[in-house]
Image: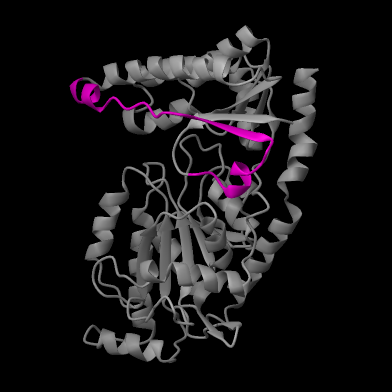
Amino acid sequence: MEVDIVANGGSDPHLSLRENPSIHIHEMKTVQLTGISKISGALALLLKAVVQFILLVWFLCFKIPRPDVFVVQNPPSVPTLAAVKLASWLRGAKFIVDWHNFGYTLLGLSHGRSHIIVKIYFWFEKHFGRMADGAFCVTKAMQHELAQNWGIRATVLYDQSPDFFHPASLMEKHGLFSRLGNSICSAMGNADCISVEEVGEHMNTTAFTSNIDGEVFLKPNRPALVVSSTSWTPDEDFSILLEAALMYDRRVAAALGEDDSMDEEQLWIDIKNGKQFVYPRLLFIITGKGPDRKKYEDQIKRLKLRRVALRTMWLASEDYPLLLGSADLGVSLHTSSSGLDLPMKVVDMFGCGLPVCAASFSCIEELVKVNKNGLLFSTSSELADELMMLFKGFPEECNALKSLKEGAMKSASSSKWSTEWETNALPLVNQVIG
């Protein structure tokens, strides 16, 4: 198949997409109406939808070859569904909606479900969604909702990670940590347990690895690496992670009988020089862009923690899979505005054989199998308990973490995107085209 992707510009897609001769990316300009939004938010939303509609129809009708089928990811619903329906009619093509969530529930996070704008959005989404020739959705729970309340028959197509999400080799880990060395070892605010590490472009050591005569080793006194990816939006309560990090720090100090008068810098130097404790240092790396990022970065800068450090980063699309493949644990704070979708970040983590602690919501157990490939939490205290339990004895004596790691590796080996596509997606595409 020849594939044309029409999308807003942003970060560069992965190299495997950019270099594939059968994939053609058509980048649209993002519509910004900041001046008008200061005068009237409702007017800005309306004008933005109109401009986006015209732009989309122009691309879909004149900038790309006539397709056999348009596949549109929902949300966003406005004006996308109407624009694609019009383009499919004008060009004699079919129209499939890929339901990842419900747009009206996302809008409801900021306006409330009873707001008139949310009700109009819901009508629009349902009306044009029902006009599609076929539908995919990401969970069985969403399939049931679409069938019962929307009159839409959808095929469940579970997200699977691409092949470039895989466990990282020791050499890949060392290369990544060497490239990220300055970012990892630069404290965001006060000095911390990671900023004492020495890094340099020509050094053969990182906070996690050593390269001796061309052979890479993981340091026995390395920190445990916890990764979380967030869009910094209201459907992910990042304060839960910050509170859990603080609780872990205090609970470890209490468990080891340490008081507030301890010389922290001397402790960090001792750990760096090889001293080990039953509970490790934790380094949280949080990736992603979004509206609430600066607010939480300001909070991180004010923290004073003994055995926990936090870093926020935005990584190249080639480095993000390597980070997941090099980490010890993933954390997902996604709770779903509808309660019916699944976090893609967890799918990517499992693709790298990375066990996950995930915020609990109604259908998350379609993806996270408790005590097999991950754990669930509802509060910051529960997450702190899980961190204490999983990392006790790290890196060699943490049997619970190793067991979850094995389960995540099995999830990675048993779930392939190519199989999911050929089994569930391709038959529907062929049926719709035929």
Q: Position of residue 427 (x, y in %)?
A: 80, 29
Q: 26 or 407: which is nearer to us?
A: 26
User: Is residue 22 found inside the magenta-colored segment of the image?
Assistant: yes
Q: Where is residue 65 in the image (x, y as percent from the top left)?
A: 64, 20
The residue drawn where x is 37% and y is 46% is 232
The residue drawn where x is 41% and y is 46% is 236
The residue drawn where x is 54% and y is 50% is 345
**In the figure, residue 283 lies in which quadrant?**
bottom left
Q: Position of residue 272 (x, y in %)?
A: 39, 87
User: Is residue 423 found inside the magenta-colored segment of the image?
Assistant: no
Q: Is residue 119 visible?
A: no
Would you place residue 65 above or below residue 12 in this image?
A: above
Would you place residue 371 above or below residue 110 in this image?
A: below
Q: 3 or 143: which is nearer to us?
A: 3
Quadrant in the picture for the N terminus: top right
How many discs appear? Answer: 0
Q: Is residue 234 visible?
A: yes
Horizontal side of 138 relative to 119 (left or right) equals right
Horizontal side of 109 relative to 344 (left or right) equals left
Would you place residue 354 above or below residue 145 in this image?
A: below
Q: Position of residue 104 (x, y in %)?
A: 45, 25
How was this image coloured?
one colour
Q: 303 or 187: which is nearer to us?
A: 187
Give the residue furthest to the top. Answer: 90
Would you place residue 434 above or below residue 400 in this image?
A: above
Quadrant in the picture for the C terminus: top right
The residue drawn where x is 36% and y is 26% is 31
- Magenta residues, start to end: 12-39
**In the figure, residue 72 lies in which quadrant?**
top right
Q: 289 or 243: which is nearer to us?
A: 289
